[in-house]
Amino acid sequence: MKFKDYYKILDIEGSKVTIDQIKVAYRKQAKKYHPDVNVGNRLAEERIKDINEAYRILSVPSTKRKYDRTWNYNIGMKQRKAKQKTSGEVAGDFFNMFFGSSEIKEEIEQSRLPQIKGENIETEINISIEEGFYGAEKKIALKDIEGKDKIITVKIPEGIQDREKIRLIGLGKEGKNGGKNGDLCLKINIDEDRKYKLKGKDLYTTLLITPWEAALGAKAKVNSIDDSKTSVYIPRGIQSGETIEIPEKGYKTPKGERGKLIAQVKIVVPEKLSKEETEIFKKLKEVSKFNPRRV
């Protein structure tokens, strides 16, 4: 069996070199023996194959460590003693001697396969409007390779938009042949609640008022999502379903811009009346000429 001196092939002295130094040496040798500058040179063609193979093994820390252990124990020691100068190949049947079926050989074969990135995983999570407005941390459970639950904490940035996606690099399915893992893509669904509905960056809420407030006009306070109360003027004669817009009190964008808080008016009639209230409404019925059903 022929064991190739990858350091000799890359013109490197000894194994105590960094991955960056290996990359520099590889580029230099690849440029020197590239087929474009060695047209018809069969020796150069073989040499470039050895150079690529040497780089595939030495540029990966795990395969470099395995290679170094075998080389230093079986060849490096002899080379230092005898100061041998070879063409880059040294005979020696030591793969099976130390590794049985040869771990390095398996790594070499695997390194020749194309790297395949793992598949992306896509899923959805639901959050409240408040969580989207202020930002939050959510925990989700995913299945790992062994089928066990893996808990991942996801940071939801403040101002995230409904149906926006968050990409978590490397948390998808595992890559093959040294390829990168896929990504985890989370689609964010923002749920409506009793207080607010979200449309774009505007928040919609309901403002309950009395019949006399609607008829006479009034001032009222509207609760906003940032826990503040804003006073609004209710114009005389306002109808149910009409809206009052409050700028800069709505939802926010990732840049911090605020939308509008839009209060939809709903006129609420009291279910029970006192005697005095009943008399007032009877009097109003007698004196009022208003009839909304009149055509």
Image (tube, rainbow, N blue to C red):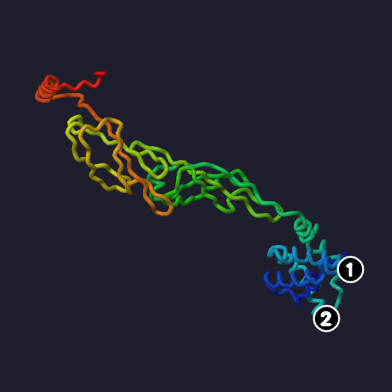
Q: Is residue 32 above or below residue 152?
A: below
- Work out how far the residue at label 1 is from the one at label 2, CA to CA, in angstroms: 25 Å
Say the numbered circle drawn on residue 43: 1
- 82 left or right of 165 in image: right
- 60 left or right of 252 in image: right
One can see residue 250 in this view: yes
Q: Is residue 271 above or below residue 116?
A: above
Q: Is residue 72 above or below residue 159?
A: below
One can see residue 278 in this view: no
Q: Residue at x 76, y 75 (%)?
A: 12
Question: What is the three-letter code of the residue carrying label 1?
Answer: Leu
Residue 57 at x, y percent in the picture: 75, 64
Sequence-wise, the earlier of marks 1 and 2 is: 1
Residue 219 at x, y percent in the picture: 19, 40
Q: Residue 10 falls in which quadrant of the image?
A: bottom right
Say the numbered circle drawn on residue 92: none
Question: What is the three-letter code of the residue carrying label 2?
Answer: Lys
Residue 190 at x, y percent in the picture: 44, 41
* Local SS, label 2: loop
Residue 135 at x, y percent in the picture: 41, 50
Bin the neighbour count of mark 2 within 10 Å (Cα to Cα): few under 14, some 14-19, many 20 and up. Answer: few
* Local SS, label 1: helix
Q: Which residue is mark 2?
A: 83
Eye-nearest disc, 1 or 2: 1
- Image quadrant for the N terminus? bottom right
